[in-house]
Each structure stands twice: as structure tokens, then as C-alpha cells.
Amino acid sequence: MQTKFMTKKKRGIGELLSALIIIGITIIAGIVVYNVLFTRMNTIGYTAGISIQYSTIANDQAFITVKNTGTYTLTSISVTIYYNGQSVGTGSYSGNINPGQTVAISPISLSASGYTYQPGQTFTVYVTATYSGGQVSTSVTVIGV
């Protein structure tokens, strides 16, 4: 009597099916990497920047000119002038300021409770600009004339 051992052939997924699964995973991973990289690369090269081109304070008035030195379009600018830590004047500009464009925010009247203008006083001018991605600020010290 002969005994036959019947062995079942182990079956897994076929070579073709495994190749298709690997190709599918590779395509999905490629799409994810593409989206992540190009989303981040779209913001590379864009900067927000402002500079105070002109600032003078004379006879209770400030004259400020601000330039958009970045690559974003600015939507507004606010100016606050301080003397000894106290805000003595504010001004603003609302509207699009394109890259390279300069705007004048003046005259700004200097008046605050208990404040009297004297030539030779030292002021700090803070400028904040708003753009689609946030805000950017700068400041300068000005001596009144």
C-alpha cells in the first residue's frame, strides 16, 4: 500500500497582481510628493518687505513715505509715532501697494494728552504693513526739527 502525501500548493497573490499594487502605491506616493513640493515651492521667492524712504517731523506734524520692497502686494499700512514710549500720532493708508510702489502717509498730526512738541525731540516711527500672508514691520528713529 502506498501512501500518497498530498501537499497543498501554497498560493499567494500572483506576480502580476503584486506588480500592479506596487505600481499603484508608487503613483500615489508620487502624487503626494508632487503636491507637497509644489505647494511649498509656490511660496519660495515671495517676500514681504517695507522700508521708510522719508521721515521728518516738524512743527507738530510728521511726514512719512513708505516703499513696498517685497514681492507681495500690500493691502494697508499703519504708522505709529512714539515719544518717550507714548503714542503721540498715528496715520494709515488703505489700498493696494504694489511691489516697488511708494506711498506718502502725511501729514500726521502729533497730539497726545500732556504732550508738547519741541524741536530736537527724538521720536520712534513704527510702520506696519499688511499683506495676504500676514504683516511686516519696521521702525526708524527721527529727531524733530
Image (tube, helix red, strand yellow):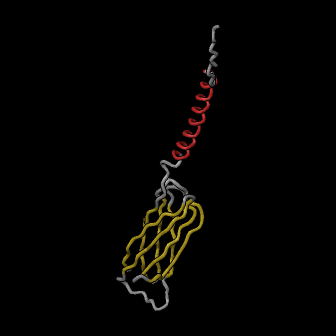
- Which of 114/59 is in front? 114
- Which of 139/24 is in front? 24
Seen in the picture, residue 23 relative to 64 is either above or below; the reply is: above
- Left or right, 81 with respect to 29, comes to left
User: Residue drawn at (63%, 25%), measured in percent from left and top?
Assistant: 13
In the picture as drawn, the residue positioned furthest to the left comes out as 120
- Left or right, 114 with respect to 5, comes to left
Q: Position of residue 80 (x, y in %)?
A: 48, 75
Pick the quarter of the image with the C terminus. Answer: bottom left
Q: Position of residue 73 (x, y in %)?
A: 55, 57
- Which of 38/72 is in front? 38
User: Residue drawn at (64%, 7%), measured in percent from left and top?
Assistant: 1
Q: Which of the 4 image quadrants contains residue 122? A: bottom left
Seen in the picture, residue 51 relative to 120 is either above or below; the reply is: above
Q: Position of residue 91 (x, y in %)?
A: 53, 75
Q: Position of residue 36 (x, y in %)?
A: 55, 44
Seen in the picture, residue 27 relative to 2 is either above or below; the reply is: below
- Which of 89/10 is in front? 10
User: Residue drawn at (50%, 53%), measured in percent from left and top?
Assistant: 71
Seen in the picture, residue 37 relative to 56 is either above or below; the reply is: above
In the picture as drawn, the residue positioned furthest to the front comes out as 1
Q: Which of the 4 image quadrants contains residue 75? A: bottom right
In the picture as drawn, the residue positioned furthest to the bottom comes out as 114
